[in-house]
Image: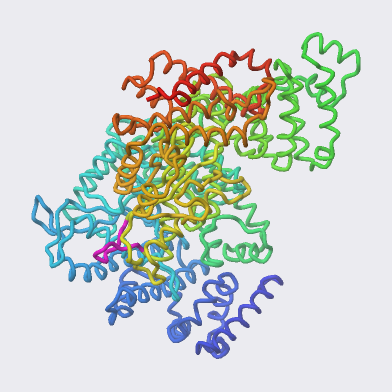
């Protein structure tokens, strides 16, 4: 009998089946009456749980009517049956569209039968995962065979240059697919590769690389594209070498070089389950495995894998906190991922010596760990039972609507359906069983993978600090306490504590939250008491506490991680900007957990890898989550830069370089995401021969601070977007667009991703006013239009801006074309008198509009006033415009410091003057950074000028400005 909640749902399902069936010829009432009592009970259970199955039945009425009447859905689904179905469905297929329909209908039939057996508990967990993986294998392998035919007809067979043999694309199935462990709504992670380079045999000859890229694109479209019949599998290619920015297909030599030279620990982890889907017995397949196995499994016992897995788990834990995924059966504590980490830790550590551990399937590896004595039998049995229960839970959640979710529902009806699927009478009974399994997994994970100090007990708090926070010290006790623990301005500090403790925010906290706050505050006060400016520091920390009292996981984080609390107090004491930045985005508290990482800024390559890893954990179709991850990534690294700067850990130029790298890496990723989304919508742009172009013919040009490698924390990005695609050509998708329109929409998508306000704010502010024709110009200009504008229509100030312009990301060809246009524009011979006059006029306009407007000499705007930053920038720009036709080396760099060096080297500037300008420029910029971190304006009074020694520097700049730009002898 169904519960009351499920009975109502069942009535809705039967009504929907009847109504839908009337439109498609699916006579549900008659079919229901024809079923036996047992069949009716089975159908009622499945259809009450799975809306996906209920929706699928009327879509193919004859097939499913017969399948239900003959009880075929209860039967096992071997791969041979799947293959036979596909033979029948594709018998008359001639075009790609015919094939797309065939594999989508196949998927619907197979999924209904797999879900049917799973929900009725007719199929064990591993039979369900195997059937899903067989379906994926069949679709991939058969699609390759079919889609190759049209390419063979046009281009012939791909032939290896060295061997003369026909080449085949091998498809690596990664993750759960590789281990035959797919879940009901899995996407599939693939990597494409082929043995050797060469050319096709014709008639239209192309390289093997181009051939297999075309084939790979066709395969992805066959599996991933949404049509009226749905899709087959969401297809994720981000695990390939170099990730989204890498080529879609690589030959064996390139694959080997990548993994030998650049393979990361997480890629070893991913490669443990990798399987060649189209067969591992051929000589080519064995060669590929011989390349991958030494990378995955070290010949020695590799205990470093523990640290790598701990690091990956820490990243996942941070994401769980950020996204509130504690009730996620995969990622939450004690979930599927922890079981996988335990097993793969042993595989990575000992798999090089014990070949049996190179087995892909997790449950089989658990058996080996038990048999070989690596883990106690009881632990292996508990982990196996927990894993199977968690996977069954995952399948039940996904069976509801064929959605890729592992999050426990909050809706009562959905909870009742999940409990029914798993054989429980109610939700609480299921939760109790789930928690028992998760607690066992947590225990074993802590014993095996977690670090020694993960469960370190904190010292018992001194009662006096607690009493201080709670305001329970009498006058005598308070005096004695302050004598023992002196604190600057203690009266004001205690008043602030009292105000916070009695605030509505704290008084309205739930009991568990208040308990956590009361546990944290004594620790915080111990840190605060040691600060030179405790009043200011507490003023900055209280807004943060108010921001996180409803997300008490952060209170626990600070209590359980004293090093994070220490860094928080230090940074808030040092910078009001940092305090406000963390308050706006409390998830940044995760960055404080490791001081060693906080004060070590990664190289550009490491930044790119970290962002790639972050986005790998996000559904590639979930733009909202992609945008959130981008924002969290940028905010985390800006915080690290600010921490290094306020603690004097790194000099200014290192900080600016780092912030610029951060913007470049982010823009590269935003470009790739925008490209992928536009291709999915409109197809690939085509070249003059009508062939699809697989990489964006596009360049992002940075001007201003980002072009000059001088970004600060709140700098906007001055960007110009250019494309060099074939004119008059169109994309190859169903919603075909002119190439120019395609790239304009891609540019608009980039700006949307960068500037949209989400709960984590925007990514960067973007200024596009330097594009051809300014605000009235196209968002994305063609390279030809850009060149014509620069040569014929641009003003002198636009050529000044071009001095600092450089390519931030994009194709090499587009970058080369831009550089050629830039060099030709800047190196035009100019009349120096006219040039000086125009530069001075523009500079005066800026002073009039943006300067301090102070005539008394009591105030100085560090950037805009005469003798300030902009004078130095204009002076450098004038030099490049005046002399680059004689000294082309001036065109090689875009930052002011190296341009000044170039002036010195070319003999255009006195070495002492060069040094003076460089030292002044760095001093000015360091002060702008310092003031930004203290949220202070750039308007300096006379006392501050004297204290900083800027009067003399301002005079030096003014002197050199006059020498270069206000004398007729300047040349």
Judged left or right of residue 140, residue 603 is right
Q: Is residue 570 above or below residue 67?
A: above
Confirm whether the magenta stretch covers residue 554: no
Q: Report the quarter where the C terminus lies.
A: top left
Q: Is residue 755 above or below residue 916?
A: below
Q: Position of residue 935 (x, y in %)?
A: 66, 29
Q: Which span is picked out in magenta?
A: 684-694
Which of 643/703 is in front? 703
Q: Position of residue 543 (x, y in %)?
A: 74, 34
Q: Is residue 404 above or below residue 256?
A: below
Residue projecting furthest to the right: 475
Q: Report the quarter where the N terminus lies.
A: bottom right
Judged left or right of residue 634, residue 576 is right
Which of 378/510 is in front? 510
Judged left or right of residue 819, residue 469 is right
Image quadrant of residue 515? Answer: top right
Q: Is residue 907 above or below residue 708?
A: above
Q: Position of residue 489 (x, y in %)?
A: 80, 16
Residue projecting furthest to the top: 483
Q: Is residue 305 visible?
A: yes
Which of 856/171 is in front? 856
Judged left or right of residue 126, residue 480 is right
Q: Position of residue 941 (x, y in %)?
A: 68, 20
């Amino acid at each position: 009998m169904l519960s009351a909640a499920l009975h109502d749902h069942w009535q809705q399902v039967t009504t929907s089946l009847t109504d839908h069936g009337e439109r498609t010829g699916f006579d549900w009432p008659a079919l229901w009456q024809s079923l036996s009592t047992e069949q009716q009970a089975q159908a009622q259970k499945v259809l009450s749980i799975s809306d996906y199955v209920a929706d699928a039945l009327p879509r193919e009425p004859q097939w499913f009517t017969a399948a239900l009447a003959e009880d075929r859905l209860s039967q096992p689904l071997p791969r041979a049956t799947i293959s036979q179905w596909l033979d029948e469905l594709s018998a008359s297929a001639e075009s790609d569209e015919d094939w797309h329909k065939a594999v989508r209908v196949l998927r619907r039939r197979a999924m209904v039968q797999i879900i049917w057996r799973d929900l009725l508990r007719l199929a064990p967990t591993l039979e369900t995962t195997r059937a899903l993986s067989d379906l994926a294998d069949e679709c991939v392998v058969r699609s390759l065979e079919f889609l190759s035919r049209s390419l063979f007809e046009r281009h012939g067979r791909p032939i290896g240059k060295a061997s003369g043999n026909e080449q085949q694309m091998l498809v690596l199935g990664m993750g759960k697919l590789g281990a035959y462990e797919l879940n009901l709504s899995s996407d599939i992670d693939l990597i494409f590769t082929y043995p050797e380079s060469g050319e096709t045999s014709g008639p239209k000859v192309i390289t093997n690389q181009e051939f297999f890229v075309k084939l790979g694109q066709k395969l992805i479209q066959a599996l991933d594209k949404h049509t009226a019949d749905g899709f087959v599998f969401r297809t994720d290619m981000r695990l390939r070498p170099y990730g989204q920015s890498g080529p879609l297909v690589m030959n064996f030599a390139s694959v080997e070089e990548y993994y030998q030279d650049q393979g990361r620990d997480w890629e070893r982890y991913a490669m443990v389950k990798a399987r060649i889907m189209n067969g591992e017995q051929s000589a080519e397949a064995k060669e590929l495995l011989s390349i991958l196995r030494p990378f995955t499994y070290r010949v020695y016992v590799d205990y470093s894998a523990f640290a790598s897995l701990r690091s990956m788990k820490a990243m996942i834990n941070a994401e769980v906190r950020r996204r509130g995924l504690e009730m996620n059966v995969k990622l939450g504590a004690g979930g599927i991922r922890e079981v996988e980490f335990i097993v793969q830790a042993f595989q990575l550590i000992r798999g090089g010596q014990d070949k049996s551990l190179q087995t892909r399937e997790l449950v089989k590896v658990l058996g080996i760990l038990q048999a070989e004595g690596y883990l106690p039998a009881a632990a292996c049995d508990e982990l196996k039972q927990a894993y199977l229960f968690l996977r069954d839970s995952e399948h039940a959640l996904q069976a509801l609507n064929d959605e890729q979710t592992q999050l426990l529902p909050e809706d009562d009806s959905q909870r009742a359906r999940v409990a029914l699927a798993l054989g429980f009478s109610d939700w609480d009974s299921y939760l109790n069983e789930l928690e028992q399994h998760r607690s066992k997994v947590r225990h074993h994970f802590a014993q095996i993978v977690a670090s020694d100090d993960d469960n370190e007990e904190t010292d018992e708090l001194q009662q006096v600090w607690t009493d201080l926070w709670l305001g329970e010290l009498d006058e005598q006790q308070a005096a004695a306490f302050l004598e023992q623990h002196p604190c600057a301005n203690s009266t004001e500090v205690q008043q602030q504590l009292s105000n916070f403790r009695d605030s509505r925010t704290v008084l309205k906290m739930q009991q568990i939250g208040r308990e956590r706050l009361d546990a944290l505050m004594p620790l915080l006060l111990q840190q605060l008491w040691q600060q030179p400016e405790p009043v200011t520091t507490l003023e900055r920390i209280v807004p943060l506490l108010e921001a996180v009292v409803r997300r008490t996981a952060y209170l626990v984080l600070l209590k359980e991680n004293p090093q994070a609390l220490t860094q928080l107090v230090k940074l808030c004491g040092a910078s009001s900007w940092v305090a406000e930045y963390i308050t706006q985005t409390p998830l940044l508290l995760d960055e404080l957990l490791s001081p060693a990482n906080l004060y070590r800024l990664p190289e550009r390559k490491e930044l790119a890898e970290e962002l790639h890893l972050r986005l790998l954990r996000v559904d590639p179709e979930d733009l909202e989550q992609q945008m959130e991850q981008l924002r969290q990534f940028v905010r985390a690294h800006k915080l690290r830069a600010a921490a290094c700067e306020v603690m004097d850990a790194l000099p200014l130029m290192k900080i600016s370089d780092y912030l610029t790298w951060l913007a470049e890496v982010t823009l590269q990723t935003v470009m790739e995401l925008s490209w992928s989304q536009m291709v999915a919508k409109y197809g690939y742009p085509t070249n003059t021969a009508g062939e699809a172009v697989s990489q964006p013919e596009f360049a992002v040009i940075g001007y201003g601070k980002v072009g000059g490698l001088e970004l600060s924390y709140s700098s906007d990005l001055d960007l110009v977007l250019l494309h060099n695609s074939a004119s008059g050509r169109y994309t190859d998708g169903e919603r075909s667009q002119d190439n120019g329109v395609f790239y304009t929409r891609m540019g608009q998508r980039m700006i949307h991703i960068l500037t949209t306000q989400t709960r984590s704010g925007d990514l960067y502010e973007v200024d596009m006013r330097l594009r051809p024709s300014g605000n009235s110009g196209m968002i994305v200009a063609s390279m030809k239009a850009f060149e014509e504008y620069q040569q014929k229509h641009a003003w002198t100030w636009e050529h000044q801006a071009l001095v600092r312009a450089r390519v931030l990301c994009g194709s090499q060809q587009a970058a080369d074309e831009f550089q050629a246009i830039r060099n030709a524009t800047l190196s035009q011979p100019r009349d120096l008198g006219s040039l000086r006059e125009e530069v001075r006029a523009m500079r005066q306009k800026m002073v009039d509009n943006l300067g301090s407007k102070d005539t008394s000499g009591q105030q100085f705007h560090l950037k805009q006033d005469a003798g300030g930053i902009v004078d130095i920038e204009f002076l450098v720009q004038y030099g490049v415009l005046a002399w680059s036709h004689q000294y082309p080396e001036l065109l090689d760099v875009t930052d002011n410091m190296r341009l000044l060096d170039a002036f010195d080297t070319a003999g255009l500037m006195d070495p002492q003057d060069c040094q003076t300008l460089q030292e002044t420029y760095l001093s000015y910029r360091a002060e702008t950074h310092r003031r930004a971190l203290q949220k202070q304006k750039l308007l300096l009074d006379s006392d501050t000028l004297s204290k900083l020694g800027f009067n003399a520097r301002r005079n030096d700049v003014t002197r050199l400005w006059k020498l270069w730009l206000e004398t007729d002898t300047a040349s």
